[in-house]
């Protein structure tokens, strides 16, 4: 295969992280389980060069695009995992960009919208394969309407009472949407 040929992400391979890190990313030496100072926690350590692989969750960032404080944008996933289910735009934070930048970039890529990223709604954690922390930002739409893409087969705004709870993609999506609807409810009650 040519190195310029794009590759598809094979999720069954990605799911092997972090359990199956067998070789050092720096020198190719065998990784072993060792107690590491100063906190004496067990980590994977290279038996050849001593590189410690501090394993941590993958960071994902996404936007809850809210129009006029009333409806929020969801997309129907056109890719695995959770193909066909609804979530908000988001994806992995790349090295060199802030979580807020990543959230805005993913929103532009997935639904074609330039958004104004506002407050952090919350951090949502999910254990399974690979372990993930999702930073969810509230964002306001600018002039361009949302569109579908290779990653989104459908996009739509939902009022809180019309959120398709049975077709939500991820546990973290559900938790963020719950927090948003609860906050809206609280704001309404306080007025
Ligand atoms: Zn090494």
Image (cartoon, rainbow, N blue to C red):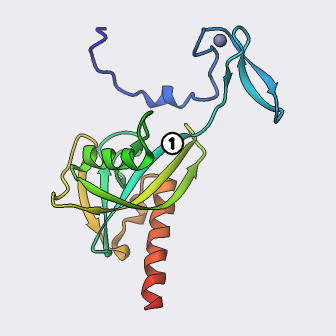
Residue 39 vs residue 46: left or right?
A: right
Q: Residue at x 51, y 60 (%)?
A: 122
Query: Looking at the picture, how far across and down is residue 141, in whole percent?
Result: 25, 62
**Image quadrant assignment for residue 98:** top left
Q: Residue furthest bottom?
A: 191
Residue 119 vs residue 89: left or right?
A: right
Query: Looking at the picture, how far across and down is residue 167, in whole percent?
Result: 39, 58
* Image quadrant, ligand 1: top right
Query: Looking at the picture, how far across and down is residue 145, in whole percent?
Result: 16, 59
Q: Residue at x 50, y 50 (%)?
A: 134
Q: Residue at x 24, y 50 (%)?
A: 111
Q: Nearer the viewer, residue 14 or 45?
A: 45
Q: Residue furthest left?
A: 144
For the residue labelled by badge 1, is the local secondary structure a helix, a strand or a loop? strand
Q: Nearer the viewer, residue 121 or 172?
A: 121
Work out whether 28 lies above or below 54: above
**Image quadrant assignment for residue 115:** bottom left
Say which residue label 1 marks.
59
């Amino acid at each position: 295969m040519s190195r310029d040929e794009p590759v598809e992400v094979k999720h069954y391979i990605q799911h092997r992280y972090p359990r199956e890190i067998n070789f050092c990313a720096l020198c190719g030496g065998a990784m072993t389980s060792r107690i590491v100072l100063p906190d004496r926690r067990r980590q994977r350590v290279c038996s050849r060069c001593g590189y410690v692989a501090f394993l941590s969750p993958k960071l994902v960032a996404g936007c809850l695009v809210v129009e006029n404080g009333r409806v929020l944008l969801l997309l129907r996933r056109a890719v695995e995992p959770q193909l066909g289910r609804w979530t908000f735009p988001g994806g992995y934070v790349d090295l060199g960009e802030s979580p807020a930048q990543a959230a805005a970039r993913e929103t532009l890529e997935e639904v074609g919208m330039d958004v104004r990223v506002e407050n952090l709604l919350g951090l949502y954690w999910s254990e399974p394969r690979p372990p993930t922390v999702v930073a969810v930002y509230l964002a306001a739409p600018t002039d361009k309407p949302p569109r579908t893409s290779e990653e989104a087969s459908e996009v739509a705004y939902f009022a809180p009472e019309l959120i398709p709870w049975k077709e939500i993609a991820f546990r973290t999506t559900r938790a963020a949407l719950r927090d948003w609807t609860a906050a809206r409810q609280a704001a309404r009650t306080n007025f």
